[in-house]
C-alpha cells in the first residue's frame, strides 16, 4: 500500500506542477495573480499525496477487510495504535501549521505587491501613492462599476483600462450598498463599501482582456454586474485616455468626485 501510495503521489505531484499549473486560476496577467497562482499550485501539490493516501487506504480497506458473504460474526474490537495516531497527529499538525504560516506570508506579500500599499482601508486617492502609480477610483453602484481617473482630469468612464507594467492602485468605494470589485485575472478582489475607500494594488504584466465582476450579492441585478477590462500598452493607454477626455463629461448621475460616497436612499429610490 505504501509503495502504491508513493508511486501515485510522485505521479500526482508531477501532474499538478507541470500539467495543472498552466490552467491554475487566476493565471499570470499580473504580478499579484502570478503569486496567487503559485500559491494555489503549492497547496494543490501538498494536498495531492494526502488525497491519494486517503483514497488508496480506502480501496485497500474495502478489499482487505471485506467480510465473507456468510460471515455474520462480530469483528474484533478495535484498539488504538499509538504509533499510527502519534504519527498522524504530528504529520497533520505540521502540514496545517506550515500551510497557515505559508498562506499568511503569501497574503502579506501579495498585499504589498505595490510598494507600500496594503489591502483594506488604505491611503487616500492621491496622497501616499507610490511614485508613478496610476490611481483609479472604482465606484460600485446598483448595478454597474464606473471608474474615475483623478490624475487625468478626473475623467469618468464606464469601462476599465489600465496600462501594462505600471503599478495601479484601485480605490474602491460604493454609492449605495456593499458590492465587491473582482478583477479576476488581475488577482484583485476587494469589497466596495459606501463611505469607505478600500485600496488594492496590482501591476499587470501582460496586455489583454480581463473580467470584472461584482462578487457580493447586491440586489436584483447583481448577476448582471459583470464586464471586461483591458490591459493596454503605454501608447494605447495614452490614446485611450485622450479619447475618454474628449468624451467628457460622461453622461451620468454620479455625485461630484469625493474620496468616498454615501447612499442617498430618497434620491435613488426616485
Ligand atoms: Cu454589486
Image (cartoon, helix red, strand yellow):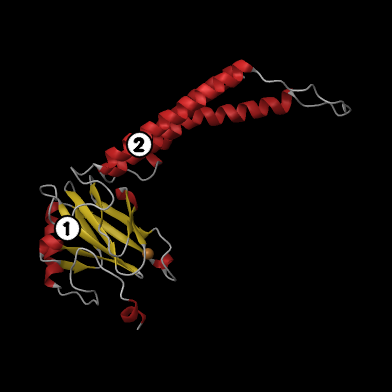
What is the spatial separation of the Cα atoms under label 2 and label 1, in whole angstroms?
27 Å
Q: Which residue lies at the image location 32% right of the left edge and 47% below the top edge?
A: 187
| Residue 251 placement, left or right of 55 | left
| Residue 221 placement, left or right of 69 | left
Residue 79 image-quadrant placement: top right
SS state under label 1: loop
Q: Quadrant of the C terminus?
A: bottom left
Give the image location of residue 50, x and y in percent.
Answer: 53, 28
Give the image location of residue 238, x and y in percent.
Answer: 11, 58
Return the residue at label 2.
104
Return the residue at label 1.
125
Residue 175 image-quadrant placement: bottom left
Position of residue 167 relative to residue 242, above or below, is: above
Pick whichever of labels 2 and 1 is earlier in the sequence: 2
Residue 179 in view of the camera:
yes
Graded by Cα atoms within 10 Å as few (under 14), some (14 to 19) or many (20 or more), the crowding at tag 1 reads many
58 or 141, which is in the foreground?
A: 141
Give the image location of residue 168, x and y in percent.
Answer: 19, 51
Q: Which residue lies at the image location 10% right of the left edge and 66% below the top edge?
A: 153
| Residue 230 placement, left or right of 3 | left
Q: Which residue lies at the image location 53% right of the left edge and 20% below the top edge?
A: 6
Amino acid at each position: 500500500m505504501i509503495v502504491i501510495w508513493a508511486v501515485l503521489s510522485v505521479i500526482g505531484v508531477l501532474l499538478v506542477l507541470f500539467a495543472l499549473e498552466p490552467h491554475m486560476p487566476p493565471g499570470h496577467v499580473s504580478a499579484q495573480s502570478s503569486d496567487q497562482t503559485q500559491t494555489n499550485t503549492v497547496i494543490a501539490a501538498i494536498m495531492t499525496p494526502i488525497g491519494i493516501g486517503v483514497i488508496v487506504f480506502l480501496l485497500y480497506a474495502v478489499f482487505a477487510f471485506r467480510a465473507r458473504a456468510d460471515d455474520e460474526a462480530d469483528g474484533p474490537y478495535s484498539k488504538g495504535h499509538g504509533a499510527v495516531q502519534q504519527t498522524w497527529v504530528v504529520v497533520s499538525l505540521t502540514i496545517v501549521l506550515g500551510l497557515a504560516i505559508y498562506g499568511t506570508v503569501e497574503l502579506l506579500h501579495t498585499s504589498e505587491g505595490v510598494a507600500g500599499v496594503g489591502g483594506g482601508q488604505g491611503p487616500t486617492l492621491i496622497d501616499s501613492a507610490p511614485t508613478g502609480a496610476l490611481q483609479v477610483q472604482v465606484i460600485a453602484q446598483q448595478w454597474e462599476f464606473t471608474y474615475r481617473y483623478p490624475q487625468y482630469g478626473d475623467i469618468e468612464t464606464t469601462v476599465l483600462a489600465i496600462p501594462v507594467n505600471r503599478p495601479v492602485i484601485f480605490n474602491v468605494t460604493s454609492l449605495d450598498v456593499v458590492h465587491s470589485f473582482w478583477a479576476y485575472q488581475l488577482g484583485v478582489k476587494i469589497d466596495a463599501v459606501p463611505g469607505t475607500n478600500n485600496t488594492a494594488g496590482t501591476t499587470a504584466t501582460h496586455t489583454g482582456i480581463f473580467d470584472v465582476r461584482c462578487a457580493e450579492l447586491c440586489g436584483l441585478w447583481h448577476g448582471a454586474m459583470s464586464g471586461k477590462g483591458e490591459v493596454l500598452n503605454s501608447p494605447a493607454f495614452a490614446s485611450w485616455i485622450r479619447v475618454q477626455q474628449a468624451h467628457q463629461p460622461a453622461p451620468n448621475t454620479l455625485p461630484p468626485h469625493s474620496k468616498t460616497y454615501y447612499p442617498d436612499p430618497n434620491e435613488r429610490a426616485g
